[in-house]
Image (cartoon, rainbow, N blue to C red):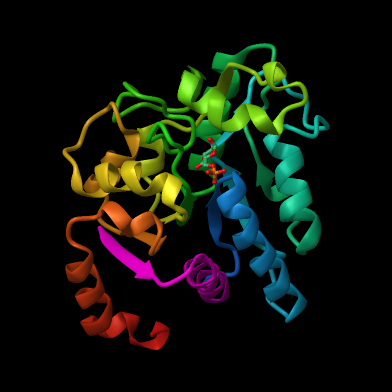
Amino acid sequence: MEVIIRPTTEAATELTAQLIAEKVKQKPSLCLGLATGCTMEKVYDKLANKHQEGLDFSLIRTYNLDEYIGLSPENPNSYRHYMNENLFNKINVDQHNTHLPLGMAEDLDKECKLYEQSIKDNGGIDLQLLGIGRSGHIGFNEPLSALRSRTRDKALTPITVAQNSPLFDPPESMPKRALTMGVGTILEAEQIIMLVTGKAKADILAKAVEGPITSMISATALQLHANCTVIVDEAAAANLQCSDYYKWIFDNEPKWKPYH
Ligand code: GLP
């Protein structure tokens, strides 16, 4: 794992968008794993700008991490709606190549199996983008999610309900369950970038990066991944014990030189 601390949210977000854009240029048919949440909105804005400047997304394939159970794709709170509004409608991706689990599926188990199969049939995820929830979840892998879990339905914890329900009107209408890629599914991505910003995430970020691996905090499983970069701003980095070390690596590792 590498941890990159950027001075501001803007700089952390820009670096994330830049790394994604470079991958798309390197491999136009990139299979991109995508995340939702407020943190990602700024990344998607930047990717939309890069498209305006000529970046071509016509061949990419995308797989989102999760979707609320019971929300139709048209529901303004569904992650499908979020993705259309924040990214897909602003770039030239082929909508047929964008995938989210279907929260309205009649047979949820079958939907999860089909989702896993579809990822496999597409050759696996090249680059998975992640945020982190206050419960330490990646996707909706709430505490006690098995580190080998696959796509499945999951009950959301009170911390997650408290975090996300203000986005719903009324807040009580937020679904209490979701379909999510499993921790095991996420770990199979060839490369992972996790973006974490803001002081509200400082405590959980420190546990995720520097704490012991535990299913109580699914983000700690990223320590097992061979190619995972965690990009954070100074506010989110506040509780890290080894910030100076991470900064030293960023300053001295040749591959990061172009980004200084
Ligand atoms: C939701 C998503 C996560 C995301 C998290 C962070 O819970 N399921 O994938 O990481 O939100 O959201 P925010 O960026 O709004 O803090």
The percent position of residue 18, horizontal first and vertical second, equals: 53, 74
The N terminus lies in quadrant: bottom left
- Could you tell whether 198 is left or right of 47 in the image? left
Q: Nearer the viewer, residue 243 or 83?
A: 243
- Could you tell whether 19 is left or right of 222 in the image? right
Is residue 95 something one can see in this rendering?
A: no
Q: Residue at (36%, 44%) from the top-left corner?
A: 188
Total labels drawn:
0
The percent position of residue 144, horizontal first and vertical second, equals: 31, 21
Span highlighted in magenta in the image: 1-26
- Could you tell whether 45 is left or right of 137 in the image? right
Work out whether 68 lies above or below 253: above
List the single residue furthest toward the top.
Answer: 106
Work out whether 138 lies above or below 96: above
Is residue 5 something one can see in this rendering?
A: yes
Magenta region's main secondary structure? helix
* Quadrant of the rendered image containing residue 237: bottom left
Q: Residue at (44%, 43%) from the top-left corner?
A: 132
- Is 22 a magenta residue? yes
The percent position of residue 90, horizontal first and vertical second, equals: 79, 61
- Is 258 a magenta residue? no
Work out whether 177 lies above or below 18: above
Q: Residue at (36%, 26%) from the top-left corner?
A: 149
* Quadrant of the rendered image containing residue 49: bottom right
Work out whether 24 lies above or below 80: below
Q: Residue at (57%, 22%) from the top-left corner?
A: 178
The C terminus lies in quadrant: bottom left
Q: Nearer the viewer, residue 111 or 164?
A: 164
The percent position of residue 203, horizontal first and vertical second, equals: 32, 43
